[in-house]
Image: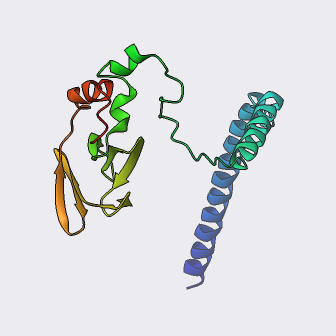
Amino acid sequence: MRTYTQLFWNLLLFLFVVCLVWFAWEAYSLHTHVSALEKHRIQVGEDKDLRRTVDQLETSLMERSQIVFSNNIDPLELSRVIISKNIMLDQTSFMAALETKPRLSCIIDGPTRRAIIRLKNKNHVVAAGDRFEGFEVVSIESDGVTLRRQGRNIPLTVQAASKDLARRLSEMEYDF
């Protein structure tokens, strides 16, 4: 029995030495690999130009976020600057802005479908459920918009300004 015990301890000691040699070899290989990587070290730090640019952009963003726009007039209303009667008679000119009935200018597809409706010298960017100038936007489909006013549905389709509008304005007929 003593020989088996001696053999067992010798095998155990042999396995220990083999494991020790194997771990030492792995540690040496890892050390060699790390040393090679240290020779090709990439400098990680701060790029001063990049930091300066980021600081300028952040400052600009903070300044712009503090700006409050308060505009009581429609910036798309051109009648304040156009004085020529010839321009006023052009059917594609700003005279279409004097329409009193809502006109669907365009439909904007996206996560939330929106529409631009021109009414009383203003462009209204609306979504379904919005209200403007006494109208409620019931729905916006790909081919048109349905408005509701005083319980009555009003369907709109995309259309250009009325060709007759410039003629009526030139004849001073303002009963739209």
Q: How many marks?
A: 0
Looking at this view, is 127 or 71 the one in front? Answer: 71
Left or right: where 21 falls relative to 52:
left
Q: Quadrant of residue 5?
A: bottom right
Task: Tell me which residue sits at (73%, 50%) in the image.
Answer: 66
Outermost residue toward the bottom?
Answer: 1
Left or right: where 167 falls relative to 50:
left
The percent coordinates of residue 55 (x first, y second) are 79, 39
The percent coordinates of residue 148 (x first, y second) are 23, 62
Task: Tell me which residue sits at (71%, 34%) in the image.
Answer: 37
Q: Quadrant of residue 8?
A: bottom right
Task: Tell me which residue sits at (35%, 61%) in the image.
Answer: 134
Q: Quadrant of the C terminus?
A: top left
Looking at this view, is 75 or 57 the one in front? Answer: 75
The percent coordinates of residue 6 (x first, y second) are 62, 76
Outermost residue toward the front?
Answer: 172
The percent coordinates of residue 81 (x first, y second) are 54, 24
Q: Quadrant of residue 12?
A: bottom right
Outermost residue toward the top?
Answer: 86
Tell me the colour scheme of the image: rainbow
Height in image: 61 above or below 80? below
Left or right: where 84 falls relative to 41:
left
Q: Quadrant of the N terminus?
A: bottom right
Height in image: 81 above or below 20? above
Looking at this view, is 22 or 120 the one in front? Answer: 120
Task: Tell me which residue sits at (63%, 52%) in the image.
Answer: 22
